[in-house]
Each structure stands twice: as structure tokens, then as C-alpha cells.
Amino acid sequence: MPTPPPQPRLDLRQRFDAMRNLRPFLREIWNTSRPLTLAAIGLRLLRALLPIATLYIGKLIIDEAVRLIGLGLPHELASAWRSGQLDHMVLLLALELALAIGSDLLGRLAGYVDAVLSELFTNATSIRLMEHAALLDLEDFEDADLQDRLDRARRQTVGRMNLLSQLFGQAQDAITVLTFAAGLLTYAPWLMVLLAVALVPAFIGESHFNALNYSLNFQWTPERRQLEYLRQMGASVETAKEVKIFNLNRFFIERFRTLSTKFFEANRALAGKRALWGTLLATLGTLGYYVAYGYIAWRTVRGDFSIGDLTFLAGSFRRLRQLLESLLSGFSQVAGQALYLDDLYSFFRIEPEIASKPGAIAVPDPIRSGFVFEDVGFRYEGSERWALRGLSFELHAGEVLALVGENGAGKTTLVKLLARLYDPDEGRILLDGRDLRDYDLDDLRANTGVIFQDFVRYHLTAAENIGVGQIDAMGDRERIERAARKGLADEVVAALPNGFDQIIGRRFKQGVDLSGGQWQKIAIARAYMRDAQVMILDEPTAALDARAEFEVFERFKELSAGKTAVLISHRFSSVRMADRILVLADGRVEASGTHEQLMAQGGRYAELFELQAAGYR
Ligand SMILES: Nc1ncnc2c1ncn2[C@@H]1O[C@H](COP(=O)(O)OP(=O)(O)OP(=O)(O)O)[C@@H](O)[C@H]1O
């Protein structure tokens, strides 16, 4: 089990650098909904002015009370009321009541607006994330680093919801601070400075721990993904069967426990340190406050301030201290959150390499001569071995070419290059004499129908499972039914309780699961759904019974008349139907020809064929 490396220290500059992410963040919030953003700001602005107003009215009430005490009013409320002396007091109390109700109302409204805006923003970001992920290269997805980044980015779409409230809250607090400061400045300016200085250590402490927290989370992304994986393995429909048979529960749980405990301990250690330092540093701020308080009390005793002034000043200082503290720690939290935004934005900055170049041309229809592989070499990212090297052959327009070769020979890789899921590292692939990279990528994909051996089992309806082969024809039931017939999936569908409208797969309540072979027929139908010029089937029949396989291939040959087709199979009975067979070994072409020619040559093909045939005798 990997032990995470020591956390890197983020210096102050890096932390402040991350603040630049706030601009695009705010811009996106603004773009999410202008009226809501304006409402959130307006409500905050109003709320910002309430605390000082409330405190000031409090001061007026106390001063008024002191004045009334001095007047010696009658003890009876009714006669005191009649004297008219209480009017001013009542007015002040009513005002304070109105402010209290107003403040509560504004707070709730602001909370509501924030919640709605955050939700909209989260959805918009999730969609953007999916859209961007769709653009990336397959190679990017196979990169563990990118998986980590994607994972962090995904967390950010939900994790950043409170950043919005926090930012607006900060702005509100800042305005309130200004109002208090303006009020207090007239009484005791240097006390303000004292308060501010006393809070600086707490602020530095906060931002330091936020950065540490971020590094910890960052460092642990791979482990957190592993935890997620283990959790899934331990409890999912897909794995339940095997987990039970091999009794793997304990194994997964133990792994999860070990890893999660490590993460927990690292987290706890940090939280402990943070609490200790936080308390110490906050005490400094409190000390500053009490020095100020003592000073004001002294001035009141000396007669410089009224009792009302004392309550106003003491209240203002207390609020100011709280506000400054929350403002400063909030600022460092915002800075911390901005670091997380980095994950999101750095994910958006990843550019796909496989894309249409400017002035890309359309794929010829019909394809005239076909594909030519010229000395093609390809190596998977991070791999020492060449999956394909010095690969040269032609795939003529209109022919059915079968690829055979032992496991790992490079058959699937070849097909991925043909579909331009990767670009070759060496050599080039031509289509009708032009480099594959010259063609428009979308057009190229539209002209290629591929079913991989690890095709996706969509937990959607049967019709949708076939329809995804040509997404814009999803509503064309006739075409879906035709594709089902071609792929021999019509019988599978007919046996489903709700036919084409039946959800297949186990994940959802109404779902009905299919056998491996039945799934495969659905996948083959998916390939037929796309009326593409180039058809590629990568071991589409591995799970089919002998009769079904024979039928599938016969039909495939019939249906691919006029199409260029590539077929990968380990079953020689099917392979021999192809127009031409390419034998791959170690990433290059070892031999090619028709079944008869290859048998006559007596090489690897004849050997493997005999081996398989012997098994049936
Ligand atoms: N995504 C990948 N990342 C790294 N290496 C890979 C990846 N996919 C395949 N390889 C390696 O590339 C080589 C060729 O694999 P490929 O899948 O093309 O073989 P294949 O002929 O289709 O095998 P099989 O008959 O088992 O399907 C193998 O050595 C394999 O380990």
C-alpha cells in the first residue's frame, strides 16, 4: 500500500496566487443568473447596515432611559403614558423591533437566494465538467494523474457551493466593519488599530492551516480514489457475485480500514494542531479587545462618555472584534477554497490533442481506395513497450479484413488507431491517400462504427441501448428494429417483458438483466444502427454460442457488402470467412492472406488453426 509523500508546503505567494481564481468564479456566478446575483448583493448590502443601526438605537434607548429616570416619572404606567414623556422611548423601541424583524427576514431571504444560486451554479459547473471531459483524449482518461484531477474537480463542483455564500458574506461583513469603524473612529481611533493588530496572528495561523489542509487533501487524492474504489467493490451489484464466491468482503474491508485509518489520523493530527494554535492566537485578539474595553470603561467613569455611549462602544467593539476575526479567518478560508478552485480550472485547461485541425476535410463518400498503415508505431503513455511498431498494411475499401494474433499482439490497439482514438507516435495512417489527421474528427467518427470487446452495457432501455449507436436517430424506432434484426438482437428483445421499452441491466428497479451473449447481440445491433462506411467488430462474438456466432458472421459478411470491415476474433471458424486475414505478432504484421493461403504457408496461423481444430475433434 503506498504511503503518501510528505506534504509540500505552499508558500504565501502560491496561496495568494490562487485568489486569481475568484474572478472567473464570480464571472461564472454572474453568468449563471444575473437577477439572483444582484439580489444576493442587494440583500447583503442592506443587511450590512443593520448592526450599527441596531446598536445605535440601543444607545439612544439607554440614554433616553437615563433621562427618564432623572425626570422621576409617576410609577403607574398609565399615568406615565398619559404624560407623553414615554413617546420617544416607544418610538425607539418600535424602531429596534422593526430592525430585528427586518434583519431576520433579510437573512432568510439571502439564505434562500444563495441556496438557489449555488444549486444553479453547481449544475452548470457539473455540465461544463461533463462537456469538457467529453472533449478529452482517451489517452488522457487512461492517465492516473488526470483521473486524480478529474476526481478533485468533481468534488469541487459540489464543494464550492458555500464559497459563494462565504464570499458574499465577506463583502457584507466588510461593509459592516466600515460602518462600525467610521462610528468608532470618532471616539477612539487608536483602539481600532490595536484591535486590528491583535487579530493578525490569528489570521496568519488560519491561512497557514488552510493551506496545510489543502495539501493534505491534494496529496491524498489517489488514496481517496482507492477508498472510493474499495467501497464500490465491497458493495455493488456488479461485484457482489464474485465477492461472495471468493469471500472477499473481509479483504476489501480490511484494506479500506487500513487506508481510511491512515487518512483519518493524518486529518486528526492536523485538526488537533489547528485547534491548539487557533485557541492561542485567538486569545491574543481577545486580549486586545479587553484592553480597549477597560479604556472605554475608564473614560465613562471619568465622565467623558454617557452610559449609552459605553454600551454602544462596548457593543461596537465586541461586534467589531467578532467581525474582524470572522473577516480575517473568512479571508483565509476563501483563499483556501480558491486553492481548490485551481483543481477545477486546471482540469478545464487540459486541451485535447486529438482534434480536427483548421481546414479539416470531410471523409470521402464512398471511400475509394481505403486505409494504408505506413510503418506505424504506437506506445501507450508511460509504457516502455511499443504496442505496435513498424506496422504496415493496407485495408482496401470494401473488403472484410480479419485480425488474428495472440493476446497482447496489438489487435485492439490497431483498431483504436484506425478510429483515431489515438494518433500514431511513428509513421502515419492514410485514408484515400491523405493522413487521417487531415480529416474532420466528427466526420471520421460518424463514418466509423466500432464495437469493442469491452463494450458498454448501458442501464437504459433496449431501444436506447441500440439507439446510442446513432444518437441522432434515437427516435427512429424502425431503424432501431432493423438494426436489432441485423444484429440478431430481435429475439432477445422479443423475450423481454416490455420489449424495446424494457430497461436492461440490474442497476435500476425495473431492470432485467441479460446473459453475456444477449448483451453482445444488443451491442452488435448498436454497431448496425450506425450505417457507417467502416465497421469494426472487436471480438464481438466471444460470448455467443456456436450457432449464433456463425449466423452473426454470415450476416456480417452479407451486410458489409460495399463497406470496409475489420473483424477481430480468436475463433478461426469465423475468421476464415474474411476476404483477407492479417496475422499480428508483437505489434507487427507477421503474415497476411486468405485462409487457404495462410494454411498453405504453414506458419503461426496454420499452427493456431490446427490447435483449435484439434480441440473440436
Ligand atoms: N490502455 C493501455 N495502456 C497501456 N498499455 C496497454 C493499454 N492497452 C493495451 N496495452 C498494451 O498494449 C499491448 C497490445 O494490447 P492490445 O489490447 O492491442 O492487444 P490485443 O491483441 O487486442 O489482445 P487481446 O487478444 O488480449 O484482446 C499489450 O501489451 C497491452 O498490455
Image (tube, helix red, strand yellow):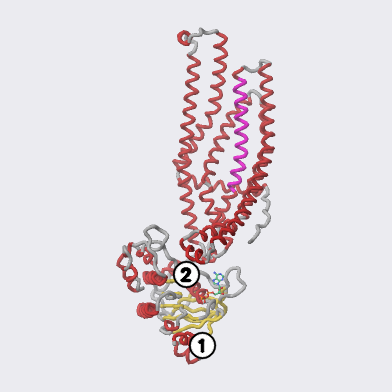
Which quadrant is the N terminus positioned in? bottom right
5 is higher (above) or lower (below) than 405: above
Residue extent of the magenta highlight:
309-338
Residue 80 x, y percent position in the rendering: 48, 9
- N-terminal label among 1 and 2: 2
Q: Amino acid at mark 2?
A: Asp
**CB within 8 Å, label 1 to label 2:** no
**Outermost residue to the left:** 478
Residue 227 x, y percent position in the rendering: 56, 57
Task: Give residue 398's quadrant in the image.
Answer: bottom left
Alpha carbon distance from label 1 to label 2: 28 Å
Task: Give residue 504's quadrant in the image.
Answer: bottom left
427 is higher (above) or lower (below) than 120: below
Residue holding disc 2:
454
**Outermost residue to the bottom:** 600
Q: Is mark 2 within 8 Å of ligand 1?
A: no
Which label number is shown at residue 607?
1
Q: Which element is circle 1 on? A: helix
Q: Amino acid at mark 1?
A: Glu
Q: Nearer the viewer, residue 461 or 25?
A: 461
411 is higher (above) or lower (below) than 265: below
Is residue 367 left or right of 285 when viewed as pictured?
A: left
Q: Is residue 193 visible?
A: no
Crowding at dot 2, Cα within 10 Å, few <14 / some 14-19 / many 20+, comes out as: few
What residue is drawn where x is 49% and y is 79%? 372
Residue 32 x, y percent position in the rendering: 46, 46
Is residue 10 left or right of 408 when viewed as pictured?
A: right
What residue is drawn where x is 62% and y is 51%? 264
Which label number is shown at residue 59?
none
Crowding at dot 1, Cα within 10 Å, few <14 / some 14-19 / many 20+, comes out as: few
Q: Nearer the viewer, residue 315 or 49?
A: 315
Residue 511 x, y percent position in the rendering: 38, 61
